[in-house]
Amino acid sequence: MIVNNSLDEVKKRENALSIIKNIVGSAGRSSLFDLTGLSGGFIASPSELSLLETYVGPAIFEEALQKVGVEHMGGDKVIPLNRTSSGILATILTIVNKDSNVVHYLAELPAHPSIPRSCALVGANYSETDKFDEFSIPENTSLVVITGSTMDHKVIDEDEFKKVIEMAHEKNIPVMVDDASGARLRTVIFNQAKACDLGADIAITSTDKLMPGPRGGLMAGCEDLIDEIKVKVNQFGLEAQPPAVLAMLNGIKNFSEDNLINSLERKDELFELLNSNFENFEKTPTGVMITPQGLSKEINIKHNLSDDDLAFVFSFILLRDHGIITIPAVSMPGASATIRFDLSTEDAFKLNLNDLNKKIESSFKKLQKAVSNEDECREIVFIS
Ligand SMILES: *Cc1c(COP(=O)(O)O)cnc(C)c1O
């Protein structure tokens, strides 16, 4: 095993960032292709930048974000947050009591780790399921959670979404929706309604997923609950700071549904190309992916690596040799190790799909060569 714990994950991420820095330094930003679907954009004009002071910034940009954010998310009011995880933590700190139950329905396990971790922090009993027939709300439940679109972009069925909200509201239990990518994926590609319009009390989205905004979270919901949560957000320093708020505002304003829709055709083309060499790629709503288990099935050489390790090594080879950024190399601890090639971001439109296919194929050949040598794999992941 190569990546065994959260510390290893922090170390591999440091290495990935150092590889990225070297590529930018030697060949320029145009030699990197960020296919994570998380763009971390920062759109801002010089006159806006000059207003980024501690109190002037929020006065101008948080005000403007209220209108644009509510249009994007629904609900009465929004709070800009440092990350989606911060919003999840703040909501759980506000609503969930020790020893109460939190139940979570999502299209496919697992949930984002911030949800079970936040529940553990307050001493709640947490359970999650992806089987709708098995979902129920026990006595003493303080919060029902729904994930709109999972880390691997599995999207919930809208009828099930509505039914879970109905079941919760019959018992007067609030519903929090983790709509990190779902706020755009569900609505644009699957024509679903906004979470707040479906009745969610709280919905949180990630402002750099499938939109040109910064890493950050945007929470929307009914005003009373939002105000209560905002107290915790401020008490624990979970709020977004003025530069992120400005970039969120402009990210939402520049969000293009067309990029998501145009990626649909290109993903079919890439999927066909990959299928001449691989059997375990799958389509996502805006690209293709291979799970760690799928990757493991493609390898026909004896080795001792875990499935996740294979994904980490593959992700690092793609980065090192071709400047292709995928999530496993750069992710935070606990994130999914699935390799996703998202075709909806700016960098993806610069890539010729035949070239991308060849780059994936040649990286895979290098992975095959490396797997039987664990020391070499460790070097690929941890040493740039
Ligand atoms: C990305 C993601 C999160 C966490 O977002 P951060 O901004 O990294 O905190 C939570 N839930 C889901 C489903 C996600 O995809």
Image (tube, rainbow, N blue to C red):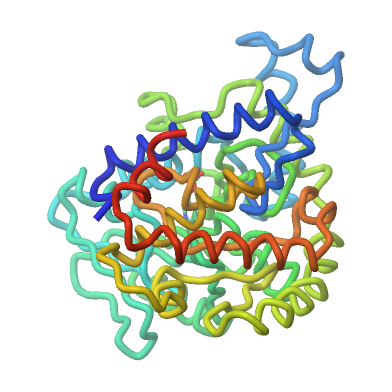
Where does the image place residue 363, in percent across and percent down from the top left?
58, 59
Which residue is at a point 20% across and 45% down the rendered structure image?
A: 122
User: How many marks are shown on the rendered structure?
Assistant: 0
Image vertical order of residue 136 relative to residue 68, above or below: below
Where does the image place residue 364, in percent across and percent down from the top left?
54, 65
Which residue is at a point 86% across and 21% down the rendered structure image?
A: 45
7 left or right, relative to 68: left
The quarter of the image holding the N terminus is: bottom left
Q: Nearer the viewer, residue 185 or 63?
A: 185
Which residue is at a point 71% across and 65% down the rendered structure image?
A: 358
Where does the image place residue 373, in percent across and percent down from the top left?
32, 56
Q: Nearer the viewer, residue 347 or 136?
A: 347
81 left or right, relative to 311: right
Which residue is at a point 57% across and 43% down the rendered structure image?
A: 320
Q: Nearer the viewer, residue 188 or 354?
A: 354
244 left or right, relative to 272: left
- Rendered image quadrant of residue 24: top right
Q: Nearer the viewer, residue 58 or 117?
A: 117
- Rendered image quadrant of residue 142: bottom left
- Rendered image quadrant of residue 132: bottom left
266 left or right, relative to 108: right
Where does the image place residue 155, in percent across and percent down from the top left?
56, 74
Residue 78 in view in this figure? yes
Residue 148 in view in this figure? no
